[in-house]
Amino acid sequence: MFILMNVIPLLLLSLIWGRFNSRSKNFLRFLIWGVLIISYTTFYLNGVDWSIYYTRFAEDADLYLAFEPGFVLYFKTLLFIAGQNFGFALLLFYTITFALLGYNLTKVKINEPLFISALLMVFGYTLILEQLRQFIACVIIFAAMINYSRNHSLTRLLAGVILAATMHISALIIIPAIFLCKVKSRKSFIFITVLAISLFAFLLIFGIKLIALLAQFNFAFKKILFYIDQNPISLQFGWLNILVLIFVIFYVFYASQIEKQESLRLFNRFIFVGAVIYLYSGAITFLTRVTFYFIFVAIFVFSLYAKENIKRIFAVKTYNTLFLNLYFFVFLLFCFMSYFRNPLAPVSFGNMNYYAATIFDEREVGRIASTVLDKALDGESNNVQ
């Protein structure tokens, strides 16, 4: 319900977004982001992940072993500005992150309410609410990708990737992805992408001893080993994997038509790389999180097709546009439903607990965090028994 309460007004607004003038759009942008900042800040004390962030930073112990250094320095700075008040630091985090995202959306002509609503449908309960480190990393990568598509500066893009990786190490996947996208031949790009990602997936599946060895010397492999330990590899293939497989097959056979639009070639290839990675996420669960950067761009590209200057944003003029609209709708629906099919989902669908005042009460936040962690530990001990 929390996500739907935020998404439904945005979807309605997206239907008439093109009818507003520049001044009205600026006012609506301020209103949309302001509501989201308050909404996510006050809802944040639901779930489990937040309590780990809170206790780690409150105790200031082994932070650099638990989190990436860039995020530690960044959040420590926010806490310093907020007078060590976790709630105010969180408010600052969402304000800065949403502001950066909103600023980069203004650089391109896009149906912004549609983009934001789709982003919330896919990532609202996971990335945005729980995984703060990767959320800021995704926003930085998104900004870097938009700038790269405009100025073609590989140096600036790599600088953005490195900055994002200091927030969440998974951002390093963007470096090989970009070099794959730069392969000139269309057929070579497809072949090399599928081969390289498949070999990497087989390494993760069958080379766990090698990964354990590399984890002793490299932080990235240490993280990979941690995720594999948390979610052991098992051969599975879910509905989202099937849906993504359809896209991969479609891209392979119709790549020449898809890549005709020069301005979107980089983005389309980037999405294809992410789709191939996602194919293996059923067996290697943590690969789902790696694909967040690519899904971010996929939502952006679809939103570009919803033109502002036509009466109906989902105007169906050909079978291609009909297929695209239906495919994207099903993808959003599957992503939204997949969270609630997860028996370990930390926030239930009916949860509408807002902590408007509590979030700024440091003692109360500490008490709730202790309760959450105690319940989590009790659950683990029960599972062991």
Image (cartoon, rainbow, N blue to C red):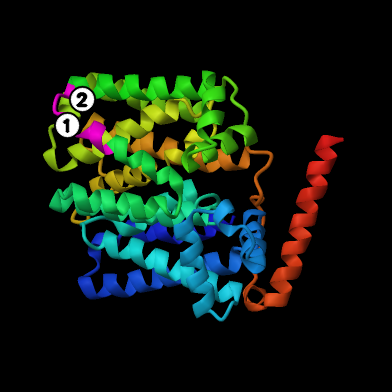
Residue found 36% across the figure and 34% down from its top: 274
Local secondary structure at mark 2 = helix
For the point 49% across and 72% down, which residue is it? 78
Which image quadrant is residue 362 in?
Answer: bottom right
Q: What stretch is highlighted in magenta?
A: 178-186
Q: Which amino acid does label 2 sit on?
A: Ala
Whether residues under marks 1 and 2 lie with C-beta atoms below 8 angstroms apart, the answer is yes
Q: Does the magenta stretch include residue 32?
A: no
Which residue is disc 1 drawn over? Answer: 259
Q: In this view, does 377 lie above or below 218?
A: below
Tell me which residue sits at (44%, 39%) in the image.
Answer: 290
Q: What residue type is labelled 1?
A: Glu
Using the numbered discs, state the Cα–Cα distance from disc 1 to disc 2 in whole angstroms: 6 Å
Q: Position of residue 359 (x, y in %)?
A: 63, 73
Q: Where is residue 380 in the image (x, y as percent from the top left)?
A: 78, 43
Of residues 358 and 191, the one nearer the viewer is 191
Percent across and percent down for residue 369 are 72, 63
Q: Write down the quadrant of residue 225 in the picture.
A: top right
Quadrant where the image shows the N terminus: bottom right
- The residue drawn where x is 73% and y is 74% is 364
Local crowd at mark 2 within 10 Å, few (<14), some, or many (≥20)?
some
Q: Which quadrant, please, contains the C terminus?
A: top right
* 183 displayed left or right of 44: left
The answer to whether residue 38 of the structure is visible from this angle is no
Q: Nearer the viewer, residue 148 or 345?
A: 148
Tell me which corner region of the image, top left, top right, bottom left or bottom right, holds residue 246. top left
Q: Position of residue 128 (x, y in %)?
A: 50, 55
Outermost residue on the front side: it is: 217
Residue 37 horizontal side relative to residue 20, left or right: right
The residue where tag 2 is placed is 255
